[in-house]
Amino acid sequence: MCSVSASILHADLDAFYASVEQRDRPALRGRAMAVGRGVILAASYEARALGVRTAMPIRTARELCPGLITVEPRMDSYTEASRRVFEIFDDTTPLVEPISIDEAFLDVSGLGRLVGSPEMIASELRRRVAADVGLVISVGVARTKFLAKVASGVSKPDGLLIVEPDGELDFLHPLPVGRLWGVGPKTAERLAEKGIVTVGDVAILGEGPLVAILGTGSGRHIHALAHNRDPRPVVTGKRRSSIGSQRALGRRARSFAELETILLELVDRVSRRLRNGHRVGRTLTLRFRFGDFSRDTRSHTLSEATGSTATFLDVSRRLLALRRDEIEQRKLTLLGLTIANLSPADAVQQSLPFDGRSARQLDETLDAVRDRYGTSSIGRAALLGGDAGPRIPLLPDPVEAR
DNA sequence: TCTGGGGTCCTAGGACCC
DNA sequence: TCTGGGGTCCTAGGACCC
């Protein structure tokens, strides 16, 4: 599926969240600033120059960079900026594959005669994103998706880099192994122990020894990438395969009743998003993180996919109860819920019978839940499981539950 | 008050079926 | 009594990415 010429674009917005903030608030321009809550989500290039990195705790970032300005994320603004950038992508070629809120692959192989060379298309794309949305985007152009992504990364910030087919390996081999997609800190360390530091080292090693170090899956994968063998085409119309939500719990201890309330909020949020996307799901996974940073999961697969909040709540509360002792002994610092095994909502019956309670009774139930657990973010939808789903049974008294 | 919050893919063992 | 081979699904966990 590789085209013979460099005609896959990887377009990636630079320091996306931070750039949107600097665009909207001129006082932040040219300053070391970052977007974050607890940890850094995105840092301006001025802050990066001082060592501030994504995923770094804000406290650590301030030690490195005492004057660092941090702002709370405004997801709505980022979503809107992203939407406008993707409109420009879609206007450029019908073959657009989104990867995340701020990057995508574009296949422009069919546009040569009509519009111009990949280089001209990439330049025009960068110009339009700057002029119409006010953001800087870097673009890599190559024969494969993998190499296009590497090229955009190398070109940043505000870059355009084209890797022609006859220069691929010369470009690739001097780079550190961490540039290979799928090589993170752990894998890089294992390779470094064997003296493998650059992509070229991987390429020379051969597949056999690499498989011996990393196992079949990643061994073959990484070996192929080191030779720029990446047959994956640009694919449009992908749908996500899971939907989840999680909540960091901070340092203080939480009662089991509090955790049940947080779980209810997670279930409410996830099932609402599921229904808004007209999807139903079958596998629930509860994710735990403890004070010592160890992680744990518990999952359950239903016999049929559903969109019912009540069912999700029922299952997830049972999964939570399974870990009750563990949670009370070791401090829980994160609780997450993911629903996977998704399918289109019209595949199953969507509206479950309403149990006939009056609106007033529902509100009373809701008040009781809020009262008991001191939360205000639970809506009636949580009790109804959608427009006409069954109500959620009132949470048992925390004392009774023991 | 301080370690987001959203995802994807892979592996391995056990259950179960043919 | 001994013992196949192949396949799917589920659960748990690990690594990685933005």
Image: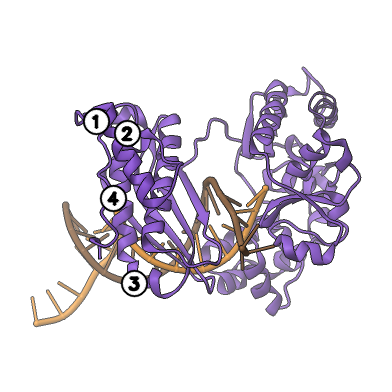
Chain colours: A purple, B brown, C orange
Q: Dot 2, crowdedness within 10 Å: few (<14), some or many (≥20)?
A: some
Say which label, 2 or 1, has the lower sequence index. Answer: 1
For disc 1, the marked residue is A352
Tell if the residue under mark 4 belongs to the same chain as the one under mark 1.
Answer: yes
Work out whether residue A158 can be spotted.
no
Comparing labels 4 and 1, the label whose residue is closer to the camera: 4
For disc 3, the marked residue is A325
> Which label lies toward us, 1 or 3?
3
Which mark is nearer the camera, 4 or 3? Answer: 4
Q: Quadrant of the N terminus of chain A?
A: top right
Vertically, is A5 above or below A314? above
Chain name for mark 3: A
Q: CA distance from mark 2 to mark 1?
A: 20 Å
Q: Name the residue type under label 1.
A: Leu
Label 1 resides on the chain identified as A
Q: Residue at x 64, y 34 (%)?
A: A76
Provide the secondary structure element on which disc 3 rests.
Answer: helix
In space, the residues marked 4 and 3 are separated at their CA atoms by: 19 Å
Taking the spot 28% from the left edge, 50% from the top edge, the residue there is: A395
- The residue wearing badge 2 is A363
Of residue A91 and residue A65, the one placed in the foreground of this image is A65
